[in-house]
Amino acid sequence: MEPYDLRDRAADNLRFIRETMEAATSFTAVSGWGQVLVGVSALITALIATTLRQPAAWLLLWLAEALLAMTIAVVAIVWKARRAGIALVSRPTRKFILSFVPPLIAGAILTLGLYRVGAVALLPGMWLLLYGVGVVTGGAFSVRIVPLMGLCFMLLGGLALLAPASWQSWCMAAGFGGLHIVFGVLIARRHGG
Amino acid sequence: MGLAHLTELDRLIHERIRLGIVSALAVNTSLSFNELKRLLRTTDGNLSVHARKLEEAGYITCAKYFEGRQPKTEYRLTEAGRQALERYLAHMDALIQSMRNH
């Protein structure tokens, strides 16, 4: 047996292990590059949001961003699943959706309630907190880095609720923009796209 | 050095499908029979034979249950299995390193 064949064999084995792990990881459907795109769109939204004076306009802008972000996320997840050649609706994906969506629905209902009583200042903190809860619970079935990102969102949400009102735009930018971009890059590099 | 290493190789997970099963389970709490089959692009018979080998070695555990009327098989990696994969990875790394130094 040639020594170089042996090395090729070992390198090939390592590649196989890595590829299998990557393909198996994307069962949980999180797309890193999709997250980076969501982060960039949130940063742009945060920039525009600081120029708006009226609460209604501010809220509408962020709702539009939420829709855009969801669309980006879904497209990125489908693209990643296709590329990895795996079924989109697997049991881990279902578990992820089932635990991720309820906190978001709670957030949507609370948004309506808080807006009606004029408590718009509470929205950024609540959004960050509940989104973080969704990521932590959904991420429980994913790689460890996902629930970690959720915890960071929850921390920022707490900060946004306690900090002066002038910090809130920064918290939104740091959370939906910054955290998505940082963790998106980490996930993309470690778990293939 | 390289050849001496080869003799110590964990034959149990050296086989492709078995290595695939262990690798896939290392990044998931559990995977069903069908998920593994799809992931490794293999047949029912092939997967069940190799999974049984790993189960007998104590590298994975296998739980059978019913979801409605559908029988389901769910696999998990044991601590022994995780350690075996880590040893195997270190082994391959060492193999590449030792060849590089030649």
Image (cartoon, coloured by chain):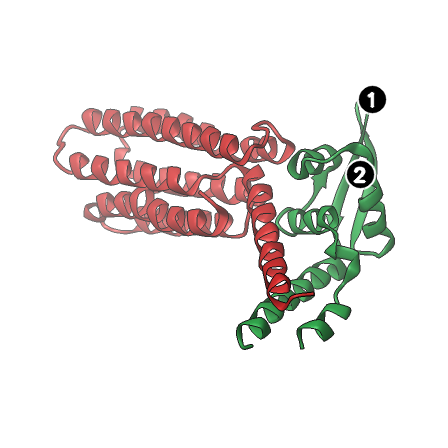
Chain colours: A red, B green
Q: Chain of mark 2?
A: B
B19 and A69: which is toward the camera: B19
Residue under the point 56% across and 32% down: A85
Quarter occupied by residue A10: bottom right
Whether residue B8 is visible: no
Residue under the point 85% across and 46% down: B52
Disc 2/disc 1 C-alpha distance (Å): 24 Å
Residue extending farthest front: A2
Q: Residue B69: which disc?
A: 1
Residue under the point 87% across and 53% down: B56
A16 and B102: which is toward the camera: B102
Image position, residue B10 (x, y; %)? 76, 63
Image position, residue A48 (x, y; %)? 16, 35
Foreground tag (2 vs 1): 2
Sort mark 2 into few (<14), some (14-19) or many (20+) by Cα contacts within 10 Å: few
Locate the N terminus of chain B by quadrant.
bottom right
Under circle 2, the secondary element is helix
Dot 1 amino acid type: Arg
Quarter occupied by residue A140: top right
Residue bearing the label numbered 2: B46
Dot 2 amino acid type: Asn
Image position, residue A185 (x, y; %)? 38, 49
Whether residue B92 is visible: yes
Indicate which disc, 2 or 1, sits on the residue closer to the N terminus: 2
Q: Chain of mark 1?
A: B
Under circle 1, the secondary element is loop
A164 and B55: which is toward the camera: B55
Sort mark 1 into few (<14), some (14-19) or many (20+) by Cα contacts within 10 Å: few
Residue under the point 18% across and 35% down: A49
